[in-house]
Amino acid sequence: MAGRLKPKRSDELANAIADLIIERNLEPGAALPPESVLMDDFSVSRNSVRESLKALQALGIVEVRHGYGTFVGSASSAVLHPWLLFRTRSSGSSTERLRELLEIREILETELTRRAAGTGDGELQQKLSGCVERMRVEGPDAATADRAFHEHICDAAGVPLARELVGLFWDVYRAVETDLETVAGSPGETAARHQRVVDAIASGDADRAEESVHLHFGEVRARLGTGPYRSRPADQ
């Protein structure tokens, strides 16, 4: 790849550097070639290299350690948090944007929970039950337990990327919901919604697990005033 591409814009160069990381199979923490090497490889100026590295740093793809060099970053989904939070707060009705976040989460978590129900994982059920017990006690740990509950299901389903996305959507939803000062459900109600999911997973019935997720999100939507629970059609 080196020497074949002569980018005219910093975003093209940023893409080329990202391609270099992938082609060389560089792991997070691995050192990137020095600026001088990147300049020679791509026939660009030092300013162009630095602008591109800044763009990649903003995405978490690289980490610039002043005095030490540039290294491959973790590319965590956390870099998407400011963007998604801004869009949710600024694009029309925040309540409508919350509904969209719930829709996306419901689509993802329905399939993930179906998969988790088919694993017969007793350890998962213990973890989920532990989270539910923590939700019964009002306080900041109840929110932590709520987030962890959904992450455990993602882990059991074997989809690591889904875990990051669900966590991202959960964090943004929580932040915007707090801004709107919505009426929160009681700890007992929150625990009951999640316990229904635990029971469905424990039954090993994927259809029952799916229905429990629809009920969970439907009740949240009803509390926000964004629409009633929509049951899965009988012919599906």
Image (tube, rainbow, N blue to C red):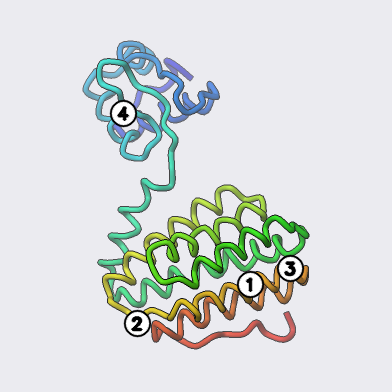
Distance in Å between CA atoms under marks 4 and 1: 44 Å
Question: Residue drawn at (67%, 57%), measured in percent from left and top?
Answer: 124
Does residue 139 appear left or right of residue 110 in this picture? Answer: left
Does residue 226 appear left or right of residue 27 in this picture? Answer: left
Which SS class for mark 3?
Answer: helix
Between discs 4 and 2, the one toward the N terminus? 4
Badge number at residue 197: 1
Q: Residue 140 in the image: x percent, y percent?
A: 38, 63
Between discs 4 and 3, the one toward the N terminus? 4
Q: Amino acid at mark 2?
A: Val
Does residue 116 appear left or right of residue 189 in this picture? Answer: right
Between discs 1 and 3, the one toward the N terminus? 1
Question: Residue drawn at (59%, 62%), measured in percent from left and top?
Answer: 130
Name the residue beneath numbered marker 4.
Answer: 53
Tell me where residue 60 sits by quadrant: top left
Question: Residue drawn at (24%, 18%), measured in percent from left and top?
Answer: 46
Which SS class for mark 2?
Answer: loop
Distance in Å between CA atoms under marks 4 and 2: 44 Å
Whether tag 4 and tag 1 are in contact, CB under 8 A, the answer is: no
Which SS class for mark 4?
Answer: helix
Badge number at residue 183: 2
Comparing 37 with 176, the one in front is 176
Distance in Å between CA atoms under marks 2 and 1: 23 Å
Q: Amino acid at mark 1?
A: Val
Question: Residue drawn at (51%, 23%), measured in percent from left and top?
Answer: 26
Badge number at residue 113: none
Name the residue beneath numbered marker 3.
Answer: 202
Between discs 2 and 3, the one toward the N terminus? 2
Q: Residue 90 in the image: x percent, y percent?
A: 25, 66
Whether tag 4 and tag 3 are in contact, CB under 8 A, the answer is: no
Rate crowding at label 3 as few (under 14), some (14 to 19) or many (20 or more) other CA atoms within 10 Å.
Answer: many
